[in-house]
Structure formats: structure tokens, C-alpha cells
Image (cartoon, rainbow, N blue to C red):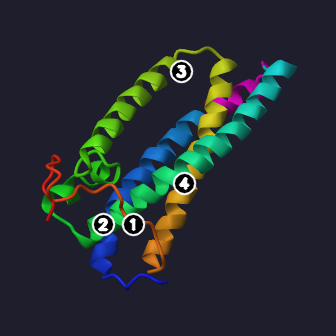
Amino acid sequence: MASAPRPLRSKLVAAIGIAFITWLLGNAIARLTPLALEPWRDGSLSSFQKLLWIGWFAGNAYFEGYKGFQQRFSPRVVGRAAYLGDHPTLLRVILAPFFVLSLFHAKRAQLVFRWGFLIALYTLIWFVSHVPQPWRGIIDGGVVVGLAWGLVAVWYFFVQYLLDRDHPVASDLPDEADGSLAPAE
């Protein structure tokens, strides 16, 4: 079942949030890829560490890329971007990156989870940034494949939306009586 065609304006508004996600993930991929490949280039990996790097890479492809991004994050982001395109308000458009990431105008429990996850993620990033090579490269190798998978998944779902095909629907929007931070329509 195909979605009803959307006006170009809706698609352009939705693209604001997707552009930010593209920049966010793309920037992280660009910064981390050289760090992930550094131990391979300088030959600092032992045989065990090479196996660990490959295993971590494969595990993150499945758990972070497929399970985390393709099954959860990417559909939610595109669904919220589609909702933003169909229901723009000045606040949502100005804060589109935060809206598509479910950092406001979401169910209260999900807001708490998303903000807590964001704080935990930034804390983890800080700790990993202090890990020496080749261990940092091993960790970053897995992160890069997960982020790249996620970026491809976001664009797969977003292209479906742009072509007026079936696409994810936002499922974490508050009910009107929910009392979440941002009021519903």
C-alpha cells in the first residue's frame, strides 16, 4: 500500500531533519574512519587484535547497524521527519534536528530515555577518545560500520518517503492528553 503523494513543501521540510542526521552521522564516519584504519596501516595489530577487530566489526554491523539503526533509529527518524513535513510548526522546523531525534515532542518515557541515552553516549565517546591505539581503532572500526549502516538505512527509508512509497510512521509522538513537553496540534 503506497502512501498518498505529499506536496514538495512537506518533503523539503522533512529534508531539513534528514540533512542534519546525514551531517551528524557522516561527520562521525569521516572522523572515525582514519582512527579505525590506523592500526592496520601502521601494523600495530597483533594476530589476536586483528581477529578481535574483525569480530567487533562484524558484531557491530549486526547489532549496531542492523538491529540498532536499521530496525529502530532510522525508521523512527524518517517517520518523525515525515511527520514534521506533514505537520510543520515554527518551533519544530527551527528545531528539526532535535525533533527528528525525538528530543522533544515525544512521549514522556521516551523523552527521558532519549536524553539519558544521549548523555550516556557522549560520556562513552569521551572515554573512548582517551583509549590508546590499537584498542581505539578496534572500537572505532565497529562504530564506523554501524554508523555507515545507519546512514544508508536512513536514506533508504527517506527515499521511500520521497517517492511516496511506504515509509516508517512516527510512533513516539505524545497523545494530546499525555502532557509531554510540546503540545500536540
Q: Are the residues flagged by discs 1 and 2 in contact, CB closer than 8 Å?
A: yes
Which residue lies at the image location 82% right of the left edge and 28% below the top edge?
51
Amino acid of disc 1 = Val
State the residue in front, 158 or 168.
168
Q: Is residue 39 magenta?
A: yes
Q: Using residue 99 as the reference point, say whether residue 43 is left or right of it.
A: right
Measured in 3D between alpha carbons, the distance from the residue under mark 3 to the one under mark 1, in whole angstroms, is 34 Å
* Circle 1 SS class: loop
Q: Which residue is mark 2?
A: 83
Q: Using residue 96 as the reference point, say whether residue 42 is left or right of it.
A: right
Q: In terms of sequence position, does the residue under pointer 4 or pointer 3 come before the other?
A: 4
Q: Are the residues flagged by discs 3 and 2 in contact, CB closer than 8 Å?
A: no
Q: Which residue is mark 3?
A: 128
Measured in 3D between alpha carbons, the distance from the residue under mark 3 to the one under mark 2, in whole angstroms, is 35 Å
Which residue lies at the image location 17% right of the left edge and 48% below the top edge?
180
Amino acid of disc 4 = Gln
Q: Which residues are magenta?
A: 34-44
Amino acid of disc 2 = Tyr
Which residue lies at the image location 22% right of the left edge and 69% below the top edge?
87
Res. 169 mark: 1
Q: In terms of sequence position, does the residue under pointer 3 or pointer 2 come before the other?
A: 2
Amino acid of disc 3 = Val
Q: Is residue 13 visible?
A: no
Q: Nearer the viewer, mark 3 or mark 2?
A: 2
Measured in 3D between alpha carbons, the distance from the residue under mark 1 to the one under mark 2, in whole angstroms, is 8 Å
Location of residue 78 with respect to 61 vertically, above or below: below
Q: Nearer the viewer, mark 3 or mark 1?
A: 1
Measured in 3D between alpha carbons, the distance from the residue under mark 4 to the one under mark 2, in whole angstroms, is 19 Å
The x, y position of residue 182, in whole percent, is 15, 51
Q: Nearer the viewer, mark 4 or mark 3?
A: 4
Location of residue 68 with respect to 177 vertically, above or below: above
* Circle 2 SS class: helix
